[in-house]
Amino acid sequence: MAEKEKACGLHCTKINNISVTIGKQQILKNVSIHIHCGELTVIIGRNGAGKSTLLKAILGEIKHTGTITFVDMKENRTKNIRIGYVPQSINIEKDMPTTVYDFCASFMSSKPVWIKKDKGLYEKIKTSLKKFNADKLIDKGIGNLSGGELQRVLLTVATTPLPNLLILDEPVSGIDRNGIKAFYELVNKLKTENDISIILVSHDLDLVKKYADKVILLDQEIIKEGTPEVVYNSEEFKEVFGELGSAI
């Protein structure tokens, strides 16, 4: 029996028949996902399944066919979607003199950050950082942050102003186990308190099972989707993850 489709809340994102072909190789085939507000949708799959390619297609960074639309249910019309993005990693030199304030201000203000520190902007950034327990980092050098600290700063930038859709591409790579759990808890709080849609690519099957509202099992196309329980108990999941899947 098919899983009952959840009714949309204030808004939803519809990804319709996204396909990507590079050269003669088809990377994605007719991927369609209906993403609801206030939900964490997690994409899982083996290496090379097309997970990061799908995110690049949604972000408009790679040529694709199909459509992506954002529908405001309150106004009953299609609108331009505002997307926040946290990449898997960014290249930052260890001795880079840029502070967290400078880094955030470069995204949040049109004024050159090297001319003069704006007191109002400083307080605004500090308030935004505080939502992710990162306000004490504001004067710290961006190159001196730990992996977990940097991801909290990137999450701050990606959600200021608050997006309709937040995309997280394996954002916990290189972070220890406690940091990974803390990051998932921050994402869960963000989703719950702000009612935004979140897409996350992850290899951490245990935490996905705990925090995801919907799981997409991808292998060029969607081979299974539903709640974590539905996907994890499926034959498709066991075929992809083998004995590991049986232990989840």
Image (cartoon, rainbow, N blue to C red):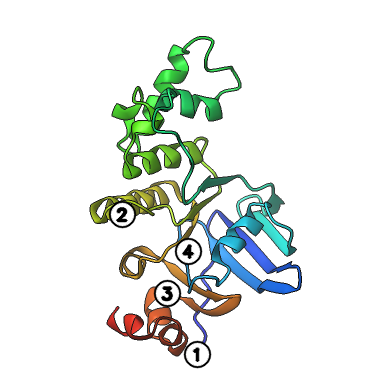
Q: Residue furthest left?
A: 178
Sequence-wise first label, 2 or 1: 1
Q: Residue furthest top?
A: 116
Q: Left or right: 53 with respect to 146?
A: right
Picture residue at 55% right of the left edge, 53% below the top: 10
Q: Which label sits in the foreground, 1 or 3?
A: 3
Residue 41 badge? 4
Cα separation, mark 4 vs mark 1, equals 21 Å
Among numbered discs 4 and 1, the one appearing first in the sequence: 1
The amino acid type found where label 4 is placed reads Thr
Q: Which mark identifies residue 180?
A: 2
> Which of the marked residues, 1 or 3, is nearer the chain's N terminus?
1
Q: Which kind of residue does numbered mark 3 sit on?
A: Thr
The quadrant of the image that shows the C terminus is bottom left
- Considering depth in this image, is 109 or 174 the residue closer to the camera? 174
Under circle 3, the secondary element is loop
Q: Mark 1 falls on what kind of element?
A: loop
Measured in 3D between alpha carbons, the distance from the residue under mark 3 to the one under mark 4, in whole angstroms, is 9 Å
Residue at position x 47%, y 29% from top? Answer: 104
Foreground label between 2 and 1? 2
| Residue neighbourhood size for the residue with mark 4, other residues' Cα within 10 Å, grouped as few (<14), some (14–19), many (≥20) | many
Q: Position of residue 185 (x, y in %)?
A: 31, 53
Q: Cα distance, mark 2 to mark 4?
A: 17 Å
Q: Earlier in the sequence, mark 2 or mark 4?
A: 4
Comparing 49 with 79, the one in front is 49
- Gap in angstroms between the C-alphas marked 1 and 3: 14 Å
**Nearer-N-terminus badge (3/2):** 2
Q: Amino acid at mark 1?
A: Met
Return the residue at label 1: 1
Return the mark for residue 227. Answer: 3
